[in-house]
Image (tube, grey):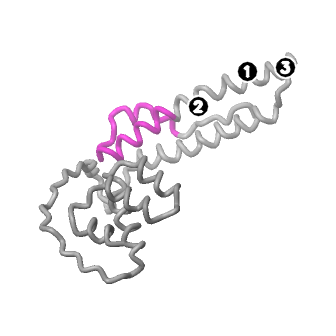
Amino acid sequence: MDDIIQWLAKGKDYAEGVRILDRHTRNRALIRHFQCTTPKFAAAKLEYELRKLLKNKPVSVSKPAVTPVVKQVITKPEPQVSPKTPIPDIIAQAKSELYELFTAISIAHRKLYELGEGNSEDVMAQRRRILQDRLPLIRRYERLYLLKEKYFDTGVVPAELPRTRRHGDVQVCCQ
């Protein structure tokens, strides 16, 4: 156990810590984990496992002076929409239409499932009609979803959104 104490007291070389842990534990999976993981991600856990092996022995380890590491944190730009700002009506309408489109697409999928896997002329014609009716719904959903998300990312209502609005006349295909 003195080697663990010495390892904690000196520079905490990751490879040496893994070798020490290997000498003191029978857990081969844990050793393989540390051997296959980069020190950046597993150094803290390795130190934890080695301290655990000391079984609460009081360890008086003087910590060497540590120079602070400055990490650059890249954050996503904050959207300009604050939670207190009400959502514009056009965005609320777009969200409602997205719900209606999603429901219509789901109904088409259920109808395709209910048709089964048969390949008779009648079944194939029904399947073709459902797929043809479903395709414009999917295209509309994808375009509208991207425009809605653009608003939530930027806080500005996209200029294309009012022109693409169809005032909720979503057709439920194949009824």
Bin the neighbour count of mark 3 within 10 Å (Cα to Cα): few under 14, some 14-19, many 20 and up: few
User: Residue 67 vs residue 99: left or right?
Assistant: left
* Residue, disc 1: 128
Amino acid type of the residue that numbered disc 3 sits on in the rendered structure: Asn
Q: Position of residue 134 (x, y in %)?
A: 64, 29
Q: Position of residue 152 (x, y in %)?
A: 36, 47
Q: Position of residue 84 (x, y in %)?
A: 32, 63
Bin the neighbour count of mark 2 within 10 Å (Cα to Cα): few under 14, some 14-19, many 20 and up: many
Residue extent of the magenta highlight: 142-167
Which comes before the other along the chain, label 1 or label 2?
A: 1
Is 63 inside the magenta-drawn segment? no
Is 147 inside the magenta-drawn segment? yes
| Mark in front: 1 vs 3 | 3
Q: Say which element carries label 3.
A: loop
- What residue is at 36 percent from the left and 40 percent from the top? 150
Amino acid type of the residue that numbered disc 1 sits on in the rendered structure: Arg
- What residue is at 53 percent from the left and 42 percent from the top? 98
Q: CA distance from mark 3 to mark 2?
A: 25 Å
- What residue is at 38 percent from the left and 67 percent from the top? 50
Mark sitting on residue 137: 2
Viewer-proximal residue among 57 and 96: 57
Q: Position of residue 82 (x, y in %)?
A: 29, 58
User: Residue 78 vs residue 138: left or right?
Assistant: left
* Residue, disc 3: 119
